[in-house]
Image (cartoon, rainbow, N blue to C red):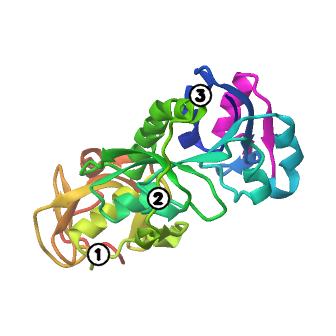
Amino acid sequence: MKVIYLGTPEFAVAPLKAIINSHHQVVGVVTQPDRPVGRKGVITPPPVKVVATQSDIPVFQYEKIRAQGVEDLKSLGADIMITCAYGQILSREIIDICKFGIINIHGSLLPKYRGAAPIQYAVINGEEKTGITIMQTEEGLDSGDILAVFETSIGETETAADLFERLSVLGADNIVSVLDKIELGCVSPTKQDHSQATMVKTIKKEDALIDFSKSATEIKNLINGMNPWPVAFTFKNGKKIKFYRARVAQGEGKKGEVILADKKLIIACGDGAVEILSLQEEGGKVMDAIAYLNGRKLKVGDILGE
């Protein structure tokens, strides 16, 4: 089939490569405009654009696809569109362009975690499993019929960053077989149970502030779920410390109190304690706890969150 692929971040790269390397033909790639990245604001193309350009595939970048993209996309004569973390809402006019409509590679087990940041919220909420849902796109937000589901477990110390990589590969490993079934007319759509649907909001920087009055499990999940962005943080004497990976540990003390700072960094919570596995001091680099503690920058009795 002739495919138009709509995606933007690194998460969307592996599925695009899988389709490019299949017998299907990618006739166009749609992605977000180049944006400034980093402290210096260097204008940078999205990862999906880089891959498409390397493969000599036409690239289309719209500030608003609904207003600017309809005629371009019609002219490509595609059979189907595939979206994967594209980042814009699609109008009915765009949904109806292709014979087989649009299918979406979504990073959750729908109907749970519709909307933004489904992978991160699965970790933040302590889910034991998640996966990829390939669904038919309709005008509602992630509410279309399910075409295929692929599950995976979430590890104890697995971060959302880890999960982004694994789910991207999971999508890549299965998208071509779903395309084949659609082409052969042997896919069986399943209606979502809308009564079980959950919506998740866009994550903001302030959501990553650690409240040490919460349980060790809640804090561990927050830390792992906020990696890679915006990264969970706390304060020590007014200076920010970011925590990238954690697990539940034994111990008790005042909330936010450092109760072990020798080869392991363990902090007391409202219920239980959490071991910090990697962290970053303000102005410093990310390092594992052992390397960090070699400098004795935190000591037993210190209180975090102040």
Q: Which quadrant would the N terminus be assigned to in this image?
A: top right
Give the left or right position of residue 19, taking residue 297 as reference.
right
Name which residue type carries label 3: Ile
**Residues under labels 2 and 3: Cα distance?**
24 Å
Spot occupied by residue 132 in the image (x, y as percentages of width and height): 44, 46
Tell me the tag on residue 19: 3
Residue range (magenta): 41-64
Residue 215 location in percent, x, y?
23, 73
User: Which comes before the other along the chain, label 3 or label 1?
Assistant: 3
Q: Which label is found at residue 118?
A: 2
Residue 212 tag number:
1
- Where 80 sits versus 282, above or below? above
Classify mark 3: residues with Cα within 10 Å, few (<14), some (14-19) or many (20+). many
> Marks 1 and 2: in contact by CB < 8 Å?
no
* Label 2: few (<14), some (14–19) or many (≥20) C-alpha neighbours in 10 Å: many
Q: Nearer the viewer, residue 81 or 166?
A: 81
